[in-house]
Image: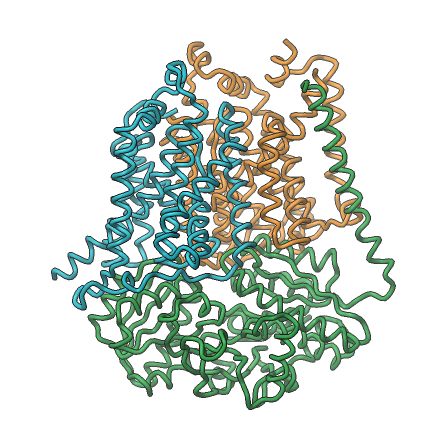
Chain colours: A green, B cyan, C orange
Amino acid sequence: MSIKTLSVRRRTLLQAGLALGASQAVGAPFVVRALGDEPVKIGMVNPLTGVLSALAQSEVDGAKYAEAEINKKGGILGRQVQLLVEDSANDVGTGVQKTRKLIDRDQVNAILGDVNSGIAYAMSQVTNEKKVFHIVPGGHTDPITGTNCKWNVFRVCNTTTMDAEAVTPELVKKFGKKWFFVTPDYAYGHTLQDAFVKALTKAGGTYEGDMLPINNTDFSATLIKAKAYKPNVLLNNMGGLTQINCMKQFTQFGMQNEMGLGGALFELESVKGCPPEAQTGWWTYEWWWNQPNVPEVVKFVADYRAATKNTPSARVWFGYVSIHSVRLAAEKAKSLDGPKLAQALENMELPPDVALQPGKVIYRKGDHELMPNIFVGEVHPPKGNADNVFTVSTLVPGEQAAGSVADTGCKMVEPS
Amino acid sequence: MTQLILFNVTNGLIIGAFYVLMALGLSLILNLSNVINFAHGNFLALGGYLAFTLSPTLGYWGALLVSPFLTALIGLAVERLMIRRIYNRDPVYSLLLTFGLAFVMQDAARYIWGPNGLPMGLPAVLAQPITSDLFFITYYRIFMVTVVIVAVVGLFAFLRYTRVGLRIRAGTFDLETVSTLGVNVRHLRTFNFALGCLLAGLSGVLAAGQIGLNPNMGDELLMPSFIAIIVGGVGSLIGTLFGGLLIGMAAALTTVVYPSASEAVIYAILMAVLLIRPRGLVGEEGMLS
Amino acid sequence: MSMAIASLGGRLPMQAGRRELALIAVWTALLTVPLWLPLLGGYTALAGRVLVFGLAAMGLNMLLGFTGVLSFGHAAYFGLGAYGAGLTLRYLVHSTPLAMLAGTLLGGLAGTLFGLLIVRRRGVYFAMCTIAFGQLWYYLAYSWNSFTGGFDGLRDFQREAINLGPFTLHIEDGGTVFYFFLLAIFAVAVAVMGVVLRSPFGRTLLAIRENERRARFLGIPVERHIWLSFSISCFFTALAGTLYALLNNFADPLTLHYSLSGYFVVMTVIGGMRTFWGPLLGAAVFVVLQDYISSMTVNWMSFVGATFMLVVLFFPRGLLGTLRRRVKV
């Protein structure tokens, strides 16, 4: 094969590729316009690749399920809903870029995202600047509805204060007041530990702890220290895979025979990645699928399982609630205008088939934080089916655990 | 007191052992072929995932034996099909090729096995501590260190006493002369790359038992391996061995006194070496390309 | 013979006109972006990203394509530029020009000092050191929580309007005004780069790339030139980093990570390593490709990675490189 024929082939390949690419780029917007009635577009930016991908994917699954459900019932304000999902790749630059893309190019009416709190915050700056309605389904850092709260941003998942205040009384009651903290050394870890310390000191407890690198894999040194301190509870604040490793090593060393184990979040996705002996401890769940006394939940879980063959986790519920919140706000405001949607969602109580839990679930006006119940209970190896790894012991109302709006430091600035 | 000392030593050994195994594979490939294998962490993950898939049929021990060889086989295919074509070019191309390969492998792992973390089952005998006093030394940790020692000794013996090993060692000094002496250099490079991937796969199986499986698991070990190679001295396998142990020990010791700095100390060592003795601890001047 | 002249960047008289034409084409396209980009399904922020990455890649190319030295850790200087600008805006003074200056100096000086350490090394060892050095800064950025915001990144700053005496440049609004601001800075930077590369210093770099030993025999202080080239390229990449911080109103540790360094190298190679405008074209291709594909499928990493590999295996000269070769021969 002579060089010339090879280069001719390369050139044709290049040209063909360029032509194809150009036709796609030019063709796409024209195709959408021809569809007649403009759908209501909701943009979702989440880290579908990277370390948070499992959680992000669950949120997207919940959102897509809600989208299909709403469209079957006629859509929002008579128009079909179109969910546009973009991958932030766990990178702020990409997340911000995708947000701008969804707003500038795709003209979305609302933005959802991100699991990564840093990205959620950066996105909120863009959505605030462009006056777009923004719901954060699962980004946990407190300032999003605290010191950095914004009129257009709402959040579904809990603050660290809520989780800490909810689980501390249970742990103190069951095990005692002397705790040892294992905390990752970054913003989320710090706020979580501070929240726990505050709750523990209120209960008259004492503590010690270790701050570890975010990606720490070996916990032996810390666990030895913990064992020497002889606490009543080991408080595991680590997240994701590091949390699983800490649990595994804790049980490998046989420490569950000497002290209790607990913390804030130990999500279903993470529990399923644990070997059975490490599926233990007392934790908070922001939503749990096994609520046999709430008929709406039973129906939801059955329908979701039929449609996707998976059991919904709290993250799925976040995505589900976020999409429905857009619908509820739009129906109340009779408009898709950002400021009007935001105003409509304040103090909005979620109907039972969206709230999927007992009691009143409301978006608090002062800081735009959703106030659901916090499910406190025990994680254990599967009982019955593979997803039954958590047994609820009490339900703490979110508002009770959250503290006042003043405590969060939120000073809401209304749109100009 | 004995507990603390014993703990520090074993912990340092374990952490160091991992770094050593990874870094040795990376170093082998680097020394002979001048290729920085960015996908090395992904070969580690591959080894772990393959063991996970094979263990229901072959059991843990069977999977431990087979999956590194499978990983090596895949490495062989990769080298044969792709890396071989770019040996004689600017090193930037091999870097980019393995960089792109890393992307593809990570995505493939996520696609095939899912984004969720997966647990790797260990045989019950390994998961226990050896005594209740020394509760932090599980049989598995001892097992890991043993396997690494066996692998490292085996590797050095192989390089020292077999013909292929001799050729590899000669090749790192002067590949051209080795070629003129009648050795099939292409086969040698392929074999060498596969050997590096074998070590990565073995690390993966061991790591899976310790930290579980996920698509990003190799990323954490890639940078320390690089640093182990630089600290020990590029071009020297013994250097890599010392480098890995050094940074492993340093990280373990730091965790006892100042946990959040345990990663920092690795970079501090790197900077110290670059400033004071850039050729590395055991490296020789002029060993660099 | 013509190949030799071509690779040295020289121009035969008849190609001079072609070069002017190319320049005019490039600048017309860049100046009218807000008009044609949305028609193609793009958006102005995308063009801003292309410019920023293109500048960073062109900075790298000074070292990689024109001096023949491989740095796989240039994101470090990019990120230092971003953090320098962000930290200035957040803690020191609300002034965009000063922030840009601070960031550029931070990244440039870090590169200059580091270059001194490793200038005697070559090939893969040099590359490994650059990677490790980059990761050092990445580690610092995500662990120094109180100062840099750690893992979550540096926030609470934004680009400030620039007071130019009689009128104010309201770049804080983003959009078209900011795009033209970016373009202006880009133009100045690129002009300076062109001047440097066309100077005797630039020619010497080419000589070093072609045959280092011969250059040394000719009495050229090779190490000093490599160090200077390294240093200058870091300054340009750091400048691009400051623009990135302004574009996002955010600086995060991933701007320092070796994967971004890899992206810069890829952009340079895709566009054409030994050409001047190649990296900009490569940046455009890469950014658009990633943007487009990641919207289509969650498996975009496979496609992007496969593209890198295909380019390395089959299009090593990159787009402009292949085009130029076709034209010459």
Would you place residue A248 above or below residue A158 in this image?
above
User: Visible in this render: residue A12?
Assistant: yes
Would you place residue B41 above or below residue C14 in this image?
below
Measured as percent of width and height from the top left, residue B158 is found at: 29, 33
Say left or right for B4 vs C33: left
Say left or right for A132 vs B256: right
Measured as percent of width and height from the top left, residue A327 is found at: 72, 76
Indicate the quadrant containing the N terminus of chain B: top left, top right, bottom left or bottom right.
bottom left
Would you place residue B24 above or below residue C9 in this image?
below
Q: Residue at x 49, y 35 (%)?
A: C234
Q: Residue at x 33, y 38 (%)?
A: B24
Indicate the quadrant containing the C terminus of chain B: top left, top right, bottom left or bottom right.
top left
Measured as percent of width and height from the top left, residue C165 is found at: 65, 47
The answer to which image quadrant residue A274 occupies is bottom left
Q: Residue at x 43, y 87 (%)?
A: A393
Pick the residue in front: A328 or C252. A328
User: Visible in this render: residue B276?
Assistant: no
Q: Residue farthest to the left?
A: B1
Would you place residue A126 above or below residue C314 in this image?
below
Pick the residue in front: C173 or C213. C213
Measured as percent of width and height from the top left, residue C180 is found at: 69, 44
Counting labels gives: 0
